[in-house]
Image: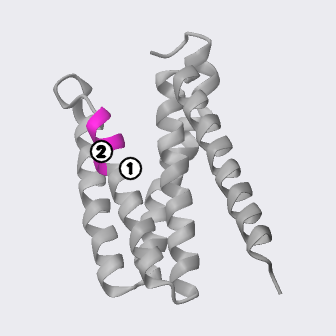
Amino acid sequence: MFSPAYSRSLGQAASFASAYRNVGVETGLTDASPHKLIEMLFDGYLEALKQARGYLASGQIELKGKALSKAARIVDEGLKSCLNIKDGGRLAQDLHDLYAYLTLRLTLANVRNDPSVIAECESLMQPLCEAWKAIGPQVHAGHLS
């Protein structure tokens, strides 16, 4: 059916594709503004939830767990860690509370294999993501800081 040489070439192609994607991500990170970095975190979070839903639907529980863990890490280590609670006022505190809530809900979704909780976590973050993207042109033009 498949020769070992063919299998090896497929493995090499996948390896090259992965390396190419990593270079693209690394280049995007080094060239990105702080605003763009947060946008990338939002996008990564939503993509991880999309993957988790797909994995859950197809019964790939281990991969679902990895995707939800990735989403939780993006919230905790990325979005929440960027908040300036001291100077950010009520908005920063509200976001901090939301991110803490999302982390708890993502854990619950993972433990219970509950797609409705995953959908809730997506619906809570989607408006923030859209608002963040909407202010991008103003941030880049220097009208917001």
At 31% across and 33% down in the image, what residue appears?
82
120 is higher (above) or lower (below) than 89: below
- Give how far across and how far down residue 43 sits, in percent: 55, 48
Q: Which class describes the residues within 10 Å of circle 2: few (<14), some (14-19), or many (20+)?
A: few
Magenta stretch: give its range.
Answer: 76-82
57 is higher (above) or lower (below) than 140: below
Give, as a three-letter code, the residue at label 2: Glu
Which residue, as the protein is rendered here, is positioned at the far right? Answer: 1
In the figure, is residue 106 to the left or right of 120?
left
Tags 1 and 2 in contact by the CB under 8 Å rule?
A: yes
What colour scheme has been applied to the protein in the rendered image?
one colour
- Element type at marker 2? helix
- Element type at marker 1? helix
Quarter of the image holding residue 108?
A: bottom left
The front one of 36 and 70 is 70
The front one of 39 and 131 is 39
Quarter of the image holding residue 55?
A: bottom right
Q: How many circles with numbers are drawn on the protein?
A: 2
* Residue 35 part of the magenta segment: no
Tell me, for residue 119, which label it has, or none. none
The front one of 78 and 6 is 6
Give, as a three-letter code, the residue at label 1: Ile
At 49% across and 46% down in the image, what residue appears?
42
54 is higher (above) or lower (below) than 139: below
- Give how far across and how far down residue 48 sits, in percent: 50, 61
**Residue corresponding to mark 2:** 77
At 68% across and 63% down in the image, what residue appears?
11
Q: Which class describes the residues within 10 Å of circle 1: few (<14), some (14-19), or many (20+)?
A: many
**Residue corresponding to mark 1:** 74
In the figure, is residue 59 to the left or right of 66?
right
Q: CA distance from mark 1 to mark 2?
A: 6 Å
* Residue 81 part of the magenta segment: yes
